[in-house]
Image (cartoon, rainbow, N blue to C red):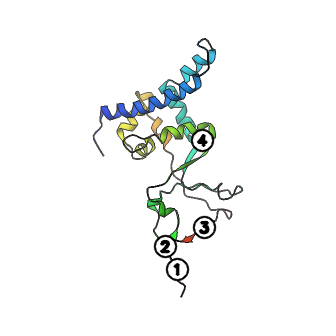
């Protein structure tokens, strides 16, 4: 852990505000200056307002490494978030083989996917999600500028629940090297 750094907080805040500004610019494209939607969007995309709404919407999505619906559309259970490098090593091909070279995914309400995009931005090789999971003081400070919004960072980090199995969610395994039965 490092000492809080106003410069680093500012860098993270600028990254977040740049993301929000890009989202706003996309929404404003094609709108006339006197369009009433423009004023509404300008208000909604003020960083404090957008982050408060994003914190609310963060509960509608879940970061996953193993999505169950991709295995079988009727499967009911829990999508998993298991870092590949934290899994036991064995001779079968599996998620553990990916190490740090993997892309996470998200499930849930598609209208909240922009929240995940925000959390996957990179600052010095780490994402805001990584920083919040590590309770990084600079990332937490970058997400709010007043005591009113102090609880917002917790909304982005959801507790990880144990998985619930389902018979349609069967894992597949292949040997990673030659195997001789004896």
* Marked residue nearer the N-terminal end (2 or 4): 4
- Residue at point 48%, 26% (across, down): 47
Q: Is residue 27 above or below residue 114?
A: above
Label 4: which secondary element: helix
How far is the residue under mark 3 from the one under mark 2?
13 Å
Q: Which of pointers 1 and 3 indicates the residue nearer the eye?
A: 1
Left or right: residue 117 compared with residue 122: right
Label 1: which secondary element: loop
> Residue 56's image quarter?
top right
Residue wearing tag 4: 60
Task: Give the percent coordinates (x, y) of residue 101.
Answer: 46, 55
- Residue at point 62%, 36% (across, down): 111
Label drawn at residue 179: 1
Circle 1 Cα neighbour tier, 10 Å, few/some/many (<14 / 14–19 / ≥20): few
Left or right: residue 125 compared with residue 75: left
Label drawn at residue 91: 2
Verify CB contact (< 8 Å) between mark 1 and mark 2: yes
Residue wearing tag 3: 172
How far is the residue under mark 1 from the one under mark 4?
44 Å
The front one of 93 and 167 is 93
Circle 4 Cα neighbour tier, 10 Å, few/some/many (<14 / 14–19 / ≥20): some
Verify CB contact (< 8 Å) between mark 1 and mark 3: no
* Marked residue nearer the N-terminal end (1 or 3): 3
Verify CB contact (< 8 Å) between mark 2 and mark 4: no
Give the residue furthest to the right. Answer: 74
Q: Is residue 83 above or below residue 178?
A: above
């Amino acid at each position: 852990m490092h000492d809080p750094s106003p410069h680093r907080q500012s860098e993270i805040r600028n990254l977040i505000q740049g993301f929000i500004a890009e989202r706003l610019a996309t929404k404003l494209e094609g709108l006339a200056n006197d369009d009433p939607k423009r004023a509404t969007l300008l208000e909604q995309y003020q960083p404090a307002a957008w982050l408060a709404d994003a914190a609310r919407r963060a509960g509608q999505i879940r970061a996953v490494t193993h999505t169950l619906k991709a295995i079988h559309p009727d499967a009911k259970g829990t999508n998993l978030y298991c870092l590949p490098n934290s899994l036991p090593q064995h001779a079968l091909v599996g998620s553990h083989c990916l190490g740090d070279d993997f892309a996470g995914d998200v499930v849930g309400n598609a209208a909240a996917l922009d929240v995940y995009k925000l959390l996957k931005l990179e600052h010095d090789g780490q994402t805001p999600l990584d920083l919040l999971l590590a309770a990084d003081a600079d990332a937490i400070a970058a997400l709010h500028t007043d005591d009113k919004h102090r609880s917002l960072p917790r909304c982005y980090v959801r507790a990880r629940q144990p998985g619930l199995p389902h018979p349609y969610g069967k894992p597949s395994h292949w040997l990673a090297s030659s195997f001789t039965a004896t």
